[in-house]
């Protein structure tokens, strides 16, 4: 009985601690979500945390260290673990549990044949561009003070959610939507949701004009289908600084921003980085 009470009390305190000021990102340990794991007191700046082979973001909140882990859409619900290594090589394991999440399925019909089945030339182009995109998304930069409380990058309508299972033209293959779409008129300004540095900009077959921002410690954001790009590789950015405008370049059916967030080289739900009142 006492044990049970203590447990409830601990959960209560945990919820209280995390709701005082809205802590972002919100913890949501499900496939495509984020696990926030409290680390022991002996963890410090020099120590490192890993999820499998991938280094994960660590931060100090109210004098306590935490690891922030991006969970792949393909992860199996159940117990998983991260580990930390200190400067003397001592390892410590931290188990955490991943719950299930059912994502919606949507059947879509596209009449433009090239959108459904790209030509051989399109595919060749895509295979040349893919390594550049993957390299940007897995970038790791040491950073002491990563900004994780994001603002919405563009005013508009949330037109497609992260994780959606999409089936095109009754094909058997399910394609997951690994970003959050925000629809707005062509030319609407897109702002950097947090401070960071531009990794690269470019034009790609699927994503059109695209900007990649490094926020530090494996937190990367990506902006696709832009009309104009206002920034250059290597440029430092403040929260709210304009990076480009809404467009419909690449493989799109209308003007929108396809917004991707990658954490430890894992695409996660961008919604978790935004204040809750944005979605009211
Ligand atoms: Zn999208």
Image (cartoon, rainbow, N blue to C red):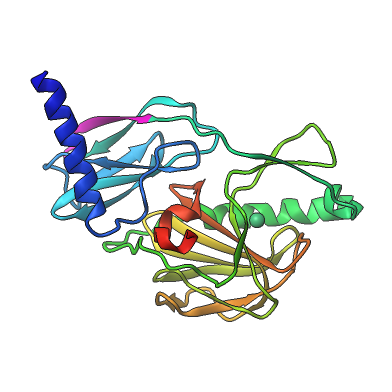
Depth check, front residue: 277 or 121: 277
* Image coordinates for residue 237, horizontal then vertical, percent: 43, 76
Is residue 134 visible in this depiction of the protein? yes
Q: Main secondary structure of the magenta part?
A: strand
Q: As drawn, which residue projects farthest toward the front? A: 280
- Quadrant for ligand 1 reads bottom right
Front-most of 65 and 108? 108
Residue 222: give x, y in percent of width and height.
Answer: 55, 62
Q: Is residue 211 left or right of residue 18?
A: right
* Count of all numbered marks drawn on residues in the image: 0
Question: Would residue 120 be found to the left or right of residue 82 on screen?
Answer: right
Residue at the spot 65% in from the left edge and 71% down from the top edge: 184
**Residue depicted at 41% across the width and 69% down the height:** 194
Quarter placement of the N terminus = top left
Which span is picked out in magenta? 88-97
Q: Position of residue 21 (x, y in %)?
A: 25, 60
The picture quadrant where one finds residue 202 is: bottom right
> Is residue 38 toward the left or the right of residue 140 in the image?
left
Q: Position of residue 27 (x, y in %)?
A: 36, 45
Q: Is residue 3 above or below residue 54?
A: above
Q: Nearer the viewer, residue 124 or 273?
A: 273
Q: Residue furthest left?
A: 2
Q: Is residue 211 magenta?
A: no
Residue 95 within the magenta-colored segment of the rendering:
yes
């Amino acid at each position: 009985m006492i044990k049970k009470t203590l447990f409830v009390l601990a959960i209560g305190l945990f919820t209280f601690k995390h709701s005082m000021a809205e802590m972002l990102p919100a913890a949501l340990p499900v496939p495509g979500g984020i696990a926030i794991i409290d680390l022991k007191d002996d963890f410090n700046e020099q120590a490192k945390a890993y999820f499998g082979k991938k280094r994960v973001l660590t931060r100090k909140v109210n004098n306590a260290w935490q690891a922030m882990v991006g969970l792949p859409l393909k992860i199996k619900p159940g117990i998983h673990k991260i580990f930390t290594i200190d400067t003397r090589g001592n390892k410590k394991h931290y188990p955490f549990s991943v719950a299930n999440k059912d994502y919606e399925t949507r059947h879509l019909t596209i009449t433009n044949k090239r959108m459904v089945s790209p030509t051989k030339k399109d595919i060749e182009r895509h295979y040349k561009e893919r390594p550049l995109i993957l390299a940007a998304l897995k970038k790791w930069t040491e950073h002491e003070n990563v900004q994780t409380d994001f603002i919405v990058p563009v005013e508009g309508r949330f037109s497609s959610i992260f994780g959606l299972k999409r089936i095109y033209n009754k094909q058997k293959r399910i394609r997951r939507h690994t970003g959050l779409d925000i629809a707005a008129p062509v030319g609407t300004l897109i702002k950097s949701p947090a401070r960071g540095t531009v990794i690269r900009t470019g034009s790609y077959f699927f994503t059109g004009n695209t900007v990649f921002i490094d926020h530090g410690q494996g937190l990367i954001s990506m902006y696709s289908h832009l009309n104009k790009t206002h920034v250059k590789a290597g440029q430092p950015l403040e929260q709210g600084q304009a990076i480009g405008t809404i467009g419909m370049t690449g493989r799109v059916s209308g003007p929108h921003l396809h917004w991707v967030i990658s954490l430890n080289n894992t695409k996660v739900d961008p919604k978790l980085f935004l204040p809750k009142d944005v979605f009211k």
